Image (cartoon, rainbow, N blue to C red):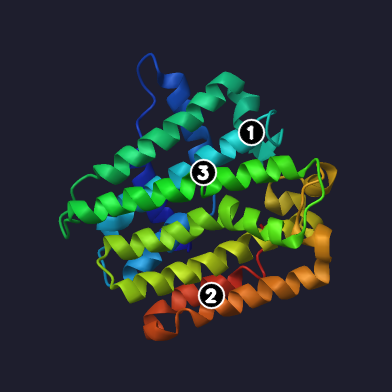
Amino acid sequence: MAEKRQAVDEALDRFFPASSGLEKTVVEAARYSLFAGGKRVRPVLCLAAAEVAEGSVSAVMPAACALEMVHTYSLIHDDLPAMDNDDFRRGRPTNHRVYGEAVAILAGDLLLTEAFGLLAAPPAVEDAVIPAERRLQAVAILARASGAQGMIAGQVIDLESEARDVDLTTVEYMHIRKTGALISASLEIGAVLSGASPEAVEALTRYGRHVGLAFQITDDLLDVEGNPEVMGKSAGSDAAKNKKTYPALVGVVRTKEIAQDHVQQAVKALDGFGHKADPLRALAHYLLIRKA
């Protein structure tokens, strides 16, 4: 992960616009959040799926970076006063605390727009040319995962659930979309761009669905048990905002069992790939012990 994270950071710096011209403030604001030290889980998963599918990592790298841009845009907007009203993200003041709400909104818009431009028309690479039909499919996957059936759906359910009682089925539905959709899409896009068989795409996407749920569930746990200094953000904010989470509904012990079950199902989805999927297996198990 550390090796691929560094490669993603270097690629993001190449692909994302530089801070110059009269519009430099909004580009600077977008870069502030884009290079705030994220784990790069989504692009790493995308690249890992490409490796499993025996695709070109360098050819898939623009798509991996597009995924991180979409994720970063969502964090900027999620932190806004109208949403979760958070002051810190990854150990630094949130975007709107530094640049103001208007520029933060535009910085998120910029990241989202640049992401689709990069996915649709990536820079040429020497070792592989991805056919246009695969890139078009990747655009559709990312749009679906980010929109009304994906991340946006999850976010609005999250907001509306603060003011009412919901059951575990609703919380799972929310998590599958708010966090899981983009994580699952990362695997699917990496596989599709690499020309994987429909069976391989389905298996990697299934892995992504379970990993996405496990990731959000462990995020819920960290908000209860995590160390704010390690996480780079305050703990206990979910309870303070009446967020509907797994620990709030079923308790910490049962939540850990559910996370373990999703990790096991994620690993099982990789049965047909042999040792080349070992990094994905290790990443799934890592979710159960992560501290941030």
Horizontal side of 241 relative to 184 (left or right) equals right
Left or right of 252? Residue 201 is: left
Tell me how far mark 1 sits from mark 2, CA to CA: 33 Å
Q: Is mark 3 on a helix, strand or loop?
A: loop
Q: In this view, does 263 lie to the left or right of 5?
A: right
Q: Residue at the location (16% across, 60% down)?
A: 127
Q: Which residue is drawn at 79% across and 72% down?
A: 254
Observer able to see residue 35? no
Looking at marks 2 and 3 on the same chain, the residue that comes earlier in the sequence is marked by: 3
Residue highlighted by disc 3:
148
Question: Height in image: 227 above or below 55?
Answer: above
- Three-letter code for the amino acid on which mark 3 is drawn: Ala
Q: Is residue 20 above or below residue 114?
A: above
Work out whether residue 291 or residue 113 is closer to the camera in this orientation and state it.
Answer: 113
Which of pointers 2 and 3 indicates the residue nearer the eye?
3
- Does residue 92 appear in this view? yes
Residue indicated by mark 2: 266
Do labels 2 and 3 touch, CB within 8 Å? no
Callout 1 touching callout 2 (CB < 8 Å): no
Residue in the picture at 55% in, 42% down: 152
**Rounded to the nearest whole Å, what is the CA distance between mark 2 and mark 3?**
25 Å
Residue assigned mark 1: 94
| Amino acid tagged 2 | Ala
Decide: is 216 above or below 260.
above
- Residue at mark 3 to residue at mark 1: CA–CA distance: 25 Å
Q: At label 1, which amino acid type do we have? A: Thr
Q: Which of marks 3 and 1 is nearer the N terminus?
A: 1
Label 3 neighbour load within 10 Å: few <14, some 14-19, many 20+: some
